[in-house]
Amino acid sequence: MSKQRGSQAEQAVSEHLSHAGHRIIETNVHSRFGEIDILSEHHGTLVVTEVKARSDNRFGTPAEFVTPKKQQKIIRCLKHFLNRHPVWHTVPIRFDVACVSLRGDNMYIDIIEAAFEAY
């Protein structure tokens, strides 16, 4: 999949989350540990959303690409973010995965809430 299609998927998920009542805090949060695709606030919870888009499931579903190693990178990146933004230290945190299926010009979004935990 092209970088452009990946960016389009992230934008579509951001819009989807906004329509579902999330307040987008930041997108594409980078650190030396990795990247967080979308950080949002929803009902007092800091939501970390990893976006995975695939045009077919031949090699696995989008969710299967959020491996334990990828999860640890996201968690380390979040810790870096929290060190810079201590206001978020006291709120609950949830890790979601947005699975985006690309079929032609159509995108289908499925959000898996609490897909993994920090351990």
Image (cartoon, helix red, strand yellow):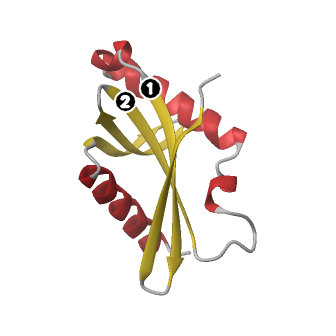
Q: State which quarter of the image contains the C terminus.
A: top right
Frontmost residue, 33 versus 102: 102
In the picture, which quadrant includes the N terminus? bottom right
Q: Residue furthest bottom?
A: 104
Residue appearing at x 38%, y 58% in the figure: 13
> Callout 2, which amino acid?
Leu
Q: Is residue 68 left or right of residue 87?
A: right
Q: Is residue 45 above or below residue 98?
A: above
Q: With 51 as the anchor, is 7 left or right in this view?
A: left
Q: Secondary structure at mark 1?
A: strand
Is residue 60 found left or right of 84 in the rendered image?
Answer: right
- The residue closer to the viewer here, 19 or 72, is 19
Q: Which residue is mark 1?
A: 93
The answer to the question of whether label 1 and label 2 lie on touching residues, with beta carbons closer than 8 A, is yes
Q: Is residue 94 above or below residue 57?
A: above
Measured from the top left, where is residue 3 in percent x and y?
A: 47, 70
For label 1, count other residues whose C-alpha is less than 10 Å away and answer few (under 14), some (14-19) or many (20+).
some
Tell me what residue is drawn at x 46 percent, y 70 percent: 108
> In x, y percent, where is residue 94?
47, 31
Mark 2, secondary structure of its residue: strand
Question: Picture coordinates of residue 9 (x, y %)?
Answer: 42, 66
Report if residue 33 is visible in the image.
no
Res 24 quadrant in image = top left
Residue at the far right in the pictured view: 59
Residue under label 2 = 46
User: Image quadrant of residue 61?
Assistant: bottom right
Looking at the rendered structure, which numbered label has been put on residue 17? Answer: none
Q: Amino acid at mark 1?
A: Ile
Does residue 21 appear left or right of residue 66 in this picture?
A: left
Residue 24 vs 104, above or below: the answer is: above
Q: Residue at x 60, y 29 (%)?
A: 117
Spatial CA span between label 1 and label 2:
5 Å
